[in-house]
Amino acid sequence: MSELEKLNREIIHCRACPRLVRYREQVARDKRRAFLAWDYWGKPVPGFGDPRAELLILGLAPAAHGGNRTGRIFTGDRSGDFLYQALYRAGFANQPTSTNRDDGLALQNVYMVATVCCAPPANKPLPSELANCRHFLQRELEILRPRAVLVLGSIAMRAYLGLLKESGQIATLAAFPFRHGANYALPGDLPRLFASYHPSQQNTFTGKLTDAMLFKVLRDIQKLLAR
């Protein structure tokens, strides 16, 4: 078993946050009517993708009836539909859809993880819950050693930069403000940091994040990785 597989097994069995444990398991019992036939995952959702990836994508958390239902990050919800279509168009995925863990989806040179591995109520994790998951992200970075990190949303960006500051790799978060399309060269041999709005329905339905905007970020990353 690889180090990444061992870590994912540890993530799946985590019960560190009582509020999140209660919520994810309640959602798995009180299913949405459209998914009554589903056997909900109802556990922390591990990372997914290419274990030799040069790009790590950091999202916020599994959706209650998306990843918490299917057991795979960004799978079974509108955010995932939007994201995987863009990844497919950019050549990072073998298909544009992600419906369940056995749908044949494979990522190429990409590994995706969440800032918080359990679905939080109202999609709003508490600071203590973000802190409890931080060591998982740190170990994912140590194992994968990506050349680029793409953060989806300001919370994911603060979590990632906060981890770097805590470990003494950067001095301040203020030097790296969040804005869509930003990319930053970080000190030393840290991966290049790219930022995008999160592909939430609130952003994609209002046009705050469009297909073209996300594709542009992915193309910028491809150019870096091709060097």
Image (cartoon, rainbow, N blue to C red):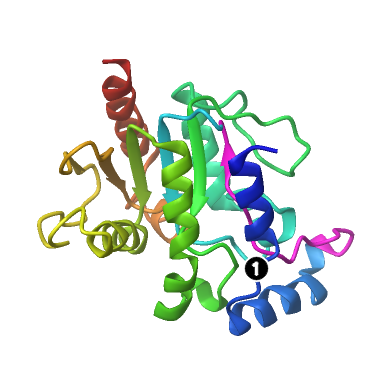
Few, some or many residues within 10 Å of mark 1 (<14, 14–19, 20+): some
Magenta-drawn stretch contains 46: yes
Q: Which residue is mark 1?
A: 14
Q: Which residues are magenta?
A: 35-50
Q: Would residue 191 appear left or right of 72 to someone viewing this image?
A: left
Quarter assignment of residue 115? bottom left
In-front residue for pair 211/73: 73
Identity of the residue drawn at 59% across and 62% down: 63
Q: Give the percent coordinates (x, y) of residue 154.
A: 30, 60
Relative to 104, residue 191 above or below: below
In-front residue for pair 189/223: 189
Q: Would residue 196 appear left or right of 82 to someone viewing this image?
A: left
Relative to 184, residue 51 above or below: above
| Amino acid type of the residue that numbered disc 1 sits on in the rendered structure | Cys
Q: Would residue 173 appear left or right of 227 to someone viewing this image?
A: left
Classify the position of the C terminus by image quarter. top left
Identity of the residue drawn at 78% across and 38% down: 102
Q: Would residue 128 appear left or right of 197 to someone viewing this image?
A: right
Relative to 40, residue 53 above or below: above
Mainly helix, strand or loop, the magenta region?
loop
Secondary structure beneath dot 1 equals: loop
Quarter assignment of residue 149? top left
Magenta-drawn stretch contains 51: no
Q: Give the percent coordinates (x, y) of residue 225.
A: 32, 22
In-front residue for pair 201/125: 125
Relative to 41, residue 127 above or below: below
The answer to whether residue 155 is seen in the rendering is yes
Q: Give the percent coordinates (x, y) of residue 17.
A: 58, 79
Q: Give the percent coordinates (x, y) of residue 9.
A: 69, 53
Classify the position of the N terminus by image quarter. top right
Identity of the residue drawn at 79% across and 77% down: 30
